[in-house]
Every structure is written in C-alpha cells, then in structure tokens.
Image: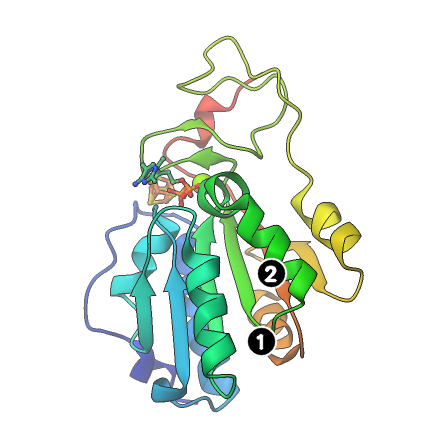
Amino acid sequence: MNWKKFDTGKTPTWCPGCPNYLLWLALKQSLAELKLKREKIVIAYDIGCAGNMADFIKTYGVHTLHGRAIPVAMGVKYFRPELTVIVVGGDGGIYGEGLNHLVTAARANIDITVLVANNHLYSLTTGQASPTTPKGAASKSTPQGTDLNPLPAVAMVKKVNPQVLAETISPQQHLKEKIKKAIKFPGFALLDIDQTCVTFGKLLRK
Ligand SMILES: Cc1ncc(C[n+]2csc(CCOP(=O)(O)OP(=O)(O)O)c2C)c(N)n1
Ligand code: SF4
Ligand SMILES: [Mg+2]
C-alpha cells in the first residue's frame, strides 16, 4: 500500500524521538490501507506540536485555531458527509481550550475521528500544565505541582454519549489498527493517545 503518497515532502520539525512521528506514520498508513483518496479526506489540525502535522500530510486540511479544530471538522462533515473527516490535536487544545467542542461532538455523535496526542503538557509553548497533567506534578506553570484533578476525557465522553467510540491507547501498540477502526466507526470516535514529550516530559516530576 503506497502510504508515501500522503507525504508532502517537508521534513517534520518535531524533536528527535517525539511520539508524533509514530502518529504521523500510522495515520498515513491507515489512510492508504483504507484506500482513501487524498481528495476525499479533510484533516482539521489544532495548534501545537501535534497540530504542526498540518504541513506533513498531503490531503485537504485546515490548520485551525487553538481549541477550534473540532468545530471546523464538524462544519465540514455536516455539509460534506461523504468526506472522511479527522481531527489531529493535543491535550491542551482538545481537552482544554476546545473542551466544549469535544463534548458537543460526542453528544451529536457526529461521524468524525479525533486523534489526541495527549502528552499531558502544553508542549509547543515549552511545558505548561494541561488538563491532563497528573495531580501534584510540577510543570513550568506549576513549579510547586498542580493541585487540579486531571480531566478523565475518555470516561467523560462515554458518559456524555455511550454510543461513541472512545479509548486511551499507547502510540507503540496497534496504533495503525486503532486508527483504522476509529475512521471506519460510523459515529464519533476519540483516540486518546497517551504519549510522552521527550523534551519537556521530564518536567512532570512529583
Ligand atoms: C487561542 C490560543 N491560545 C493559546 C495559544 C498559545 N499556544 C500555542 S500552542 C499551545 C499549547 C499546545 O498544547 P497542546 O494542545 O497540548 O499541543 P502540544 O504542543 O502539546 O502537541 C498554546 C497554549 C494559541 N496559539 N492560541
Ligand atoms: S516539544 Fe515535545 S511534543 Fe513537541 S516536538 Fe518536541 S518532543 Fe514532540
Ligand atoms: Mg500537549
């Protein structure tokens, strides 16, 4: 299967060893194995390290605003239901600034696939606490440790609508198969990809 047709020819700017490389490869391979045509795919990217994938995948796409990738994807899907619509974003954008959009998409059970590179930090802005930073963990914005409970995004989405597909997964295990299953799922799908930012993840000490 020729997944290289989804390459833009641009070299990613992620740090060496960043898990976003695994997501990038698995997503391109998934699109190829599902035999999707480039012109029938729209990917809405959030802002952040994960969202920078906008430059590295050759389909139709929109690099949106921080937290606003889901409403853009919902708009595309409502008006062009025949298209495959995917969101790529980080925990800060999807679970923080865009949380209401995540809830609304799950309530509507709209047929989009949301891929969250959940590194438990605002990484592009160098390591502030995000909604999934573990309680008590230090970060650049919480040097004494955050006293907030982390957001249980997958459980919350399932509670809002038990019909959706929502799962926390590892970037190292069956990522491609999970992405293919989520894209084929006839309704709202959230893959919460639990990953470590190799550059700022070490800040997350207790
Ligand atoms: C509306 C808005 N708020 C804040 C920012 C600054 N900003 C850019 S990227 C980012 C953090 C992104 O974190 P996350 O969504 O988790 O993605 P990651 O970089 O970790 O992949 C922030 C706060 C912005 N660009 N726009
Ligand atoms: S800062 Fe972290 S998330 Fe961003 S590219 Fe580097 S390793 Fe990846
Ligand atoms: Mg993040």
Residue carrying label 1? 183
Residue carrying label 2? 105
Residue 195 shows up from this direction: yes
184 or 83, nearer to the observer: 83
Residue 170 shows up from this direction: no
Is residue 64 rendered to the left or right of residue 28? left
| Residue type pointed to by label 2 | Ala
Q: Residue at x 61, y 27 (%)?
A: 134
Q: How is the image coloured?
A: rainbow
Distance from label 1 to label 2 (Cα)? 15 Å
Q: Looking at the picture, how far across and down is residue 62, in whole percent?
A: 31, 66
Regarding mark 1 in the picture, which secondary structure is present there? Answer: helix
Is residue 175 rendered to the left or right of residue 80? right
| Residue type pointed to by label 1 | Ile
Q: Looking at the picture, how far across and down is residue 80, in whole percent?
A: 46, 83
Regarding mark 2 in the picture, which secondary structure is present there? Answer: helix
Q: Quadrant of the N terminus?
A: bottom left
Q: Residue at x 52, y 60 (%)?
A: 115
Q: Tell me where residue 201 sits by quadrant.
A: top left
Q: Tell me where residue 175 sits by quadrant.
A: bottom right
Q: Looking at the picture, how far across and down is residue 117, in whole percent?
A: 49, 50
Q: Compared with residue 180, is residue 64 higher up or lower down, i.e. above or below? A: above
Q: Quadrant of the C terminus?
A: top right
Q: Compared with residue 74, is residue 40 higher up or lower down, i.e. above or below? A: below
Is residue 155 rendered to the left or right of residue 50? right
Tell me the mark number nearer the camera, choosing from 1 and 2. 2
